[in-house]
Image: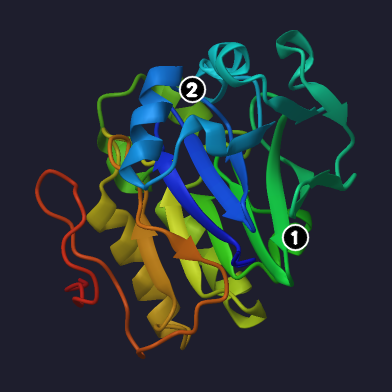
Amino acid sequence: MSMSLRLCVLASGSSGNATYMEAGGTGLLVDAGLSCGRIRTLLARIGRRLEDVEAMLLTHGHSDHTSGVRSLVRERGVAVYAATGVGERLGAKLVEAWEPVPIGNLLAEFFEVPHDSRTYGVRVSSGGRTVALATDLGEVSLGVLRRMRGAEAVVLEANHDLDWLLRGPYPADLKRRVASSNGHLSNRQAAEAACALAPHGLKDLILAHLSKTNNSPARATGTVMGALREAGHGGIRVRAALASHPTPWVEAGEPLESPEYAYRYGEDGTEGEARQLFDFE
C-alpha cells in the first residue's frame, strides 16, 4: 500500500469546511462543518467512504467547522482531537499545541493562529512528507510561518479581496472585524504568506474559505499567482477550494512539471481543465 501523503479539500467556505487527508490506508478529517450525509457524498466523489475516516481534528469551535462532528461520531465512532479551548463541548480528546498526535500512519500537530475565537492550524506528516492547513486567521505572523515552513502542500485562507470587502454590502463593523488581525486573510496577505513559504519546499497551495460576496476563485488565484510569479516561484500549483466541489487530490511533494501552473475557473466557479494558463491582470 502506498505511503504517499495526499489531501483533498472536500468543501470550504462559510457554509461548511472539511478536508480529507490520507497516507498508507489511514484517513483523517480536518474539521466537519457539514452534515454526515453531505460528507459521505463528498467523500464518494473522490472514491472514499466514511469507513475510511479513522479520526478527526478540529481547528476551532465555529459551527462551519464542527456542525457534523456529533453525527459522524455516532455514525463511525471515530476519535476526535482538538487543542485546549476548542473541543471540550464536543467531547474531543484534548492535546496541547505542538503535542504530536499519532493517528495510524499520520502524525498531526496543532499550532495556534490569530482569530476571533481560539483557533488552530494543523501540520500533518507521514513518510517524510508534510502538509499544513490554516483556514481562519487574521494575519500570518512569523510564528505561524515557522509552523507551516517546510510543508510541500498548504491549505491557506484567502477570504476576501480587500477592495471588494471595503466597497461591498457588509455593515461597517463587520468589515472592520473581517479585515482585522483577528479576522480573515485577504488575497494579498495570502500571497505574501505564499511567497514566504515558497523557498521552503512549497509545491501546492490551496486557497480556502473564499467569501462568496467579497472574493472569487479567479480573483484569489490571480492575486496569489501574480505575486508568486513576480517572486520567481511561478511553478507552484495554486488552486481555490470551493464550497460545493471537492478539489482534485493533491499529493505532497509531487514534482513541479512546468514553469507556470494555474487553473481556470468558469462563471459558476467550477474548475476548468488543468494545466491551462490563467490570464492575469
10 Å crowding of disc 2: few (<14), some (14-19), many (20+)? some
Which residue carries the number 2 mark? Answer: 64
Which quadrant: the C terminus?
A: bottom left
Please say whether residue 132 is visible from this viewpoint. yes
Report the side of 39 relative to 109 (left or right).
Answer: left
Say which residue appears at 35% left-offset and 60% top-offset.
239
Q: Secondary structure at mark 1?
A: helix
Q: Nearer the viewer, residue 154 or 81?
A: 81
Q: Position of residue 95 (x, y in %)?
A: 87, 32
Residue type, numbered disc 1: Leu
Which quadrant: the N terminus?
A: bottom right
Q: Nearer the viewer, mark 1 or mark 2?
A: 2
Disc ID at residue 73: none
Determine the CA span between mark 1 and mark 2: 27 Å
Q: Secondary structure at mark 2?
A: helix
Residue type, numbered disc 2: Asp
Q: Pick out the residue farthest to the left.
A: 267
Q: Pick out the residue farthest to the front.
A: 1
Please say whether residue 15 is visible from this viewpoint. no
Say which residue appears at 38% left-offset and 43% top-offset.
160
Depicted 53 relative to depicted 275: above or below: above
Q: Position of residue 89 (x, y in %)?
A: 74, 9
Which residue carries the number 1 mark? Answer: 142
| Disc on the earlier residue, 1 or 2 | 2
Q: Nearer the viewer, residue 105 or 229?
A: 105
Which of the 4 quarters of the picture holds residue 82? top right
Q: Position of residue 29 (x, y in %)?
A: 58, 37
